[in-house]
Amino acid sequence: MNSFSNTNYSPSIKLADLVEKNAHLLLLLEHFEINFPLNNKSILQICEEKNIDTNLFFVILSLYNTTDFVPNKPLSFNDIVPIVSFLKKSHHFYSKEMYPNILQSIKEMAQVNNYKEMSLVEKFFINYFNEVTEHLNYENEIVFPYVLSLHEKIAHPNATKQKTQYSVMEYKEHHNDIEEKLTDLKNLLINYLPEKNDQVIRRKLFFKLYKLEYDLTIHSKIEDLLLIPLVGRMEQSLKNEQQ
């Protein structure tokens, strides 16, 4: 995979050219609800069509292309809406596609590999899936509505404002790393689970796990590096208005 920083990008670059260099960007397109065909459109054209700020797009694009990328430009409060939308779409991808597909692969392995360890693998993943579901539901039902309510208050300062006891610090404390147990599962499959005619299924399972892990890493970086700092600034802005 090629490495870039947002300083290497130009709004005139054709998005299709970048997708050809990094297939993981297919998930970026999906989470931004950018559909095919791209018709050789530039990043600027697509961002204008989707009402996405090009700086925000470049930042998330850079996170997908460079694992250690750190944003160096402040985001606008208006970026909070597309960020939340992006994260919601990724939640749907995890809960409705990736996790069920991984569980199906584990069940297929269990059909050909009857070692007692397989039942433990399945139980481990189901428990993990339940934890992830709780995490995603918390964000969908508590965090994101709160964040969007802050944006609404800033966008419409003269509207009636309801006070809330929630804050981004609560989210930060509740925010856990849902990638860690994937590492445990991969380690179990690589080093300890006996093989019994399941090499092909196991290889397909690995690809799914690595694909999920990659996108989850980006998901966490978007929350930690973009969402939480931006929400903190929004809270401070509203607090300053009340003083």
Image (cartoon, rainbow, N blue to C red):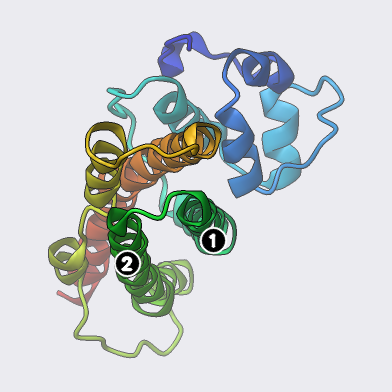
Which amino acid type is marked by label 2?
Lys
The image shows residue 134, relative to residue 72, as above or below, that is below
At x 25% / y 86%, what residue is drawn?
Answer: 164
The image shows residue 27, relative to residue 103, as above or below, that is above
Q: Position of residue 186 (x, y in %)?
A: 30, 39
Q: Is residue 123 left or right of residue 106?
A: left
Crowd tier of the residue under label 2, counting other residues whose Cα lies within 10 Å: few below 14, some 14–19, many 20 or above: few
Q: Quadrant of residue 140?
A: bottom left
Crowd tier of the residue under label 1, counting other residues whose Cα lies within 10 Å: few below 14, some 14–19, many 20 or above: some
Asked whether the beta carbons under mark 2 and mark 1 sit within 8 Å of each other, the answer is: no
Which amino acid type is marked by label 1?
Pro
Q: Position of residue 24 (x, y in %)?
A: 55, 29
Q: Quadrant of residue 163?
A: bottom left
The image shows residue 131, relative to residue 182, as above or below, that is below
Residue 91 seen in this snapshot:
yes
Q: Position of residue 78 (x, y in %)?
A: 48, 53
The residue that label 2 is drawn on is 123
At x 22% / y 45%, what residue is drawn?
Answer: 184
The residue that label 1 is drawn on is 100
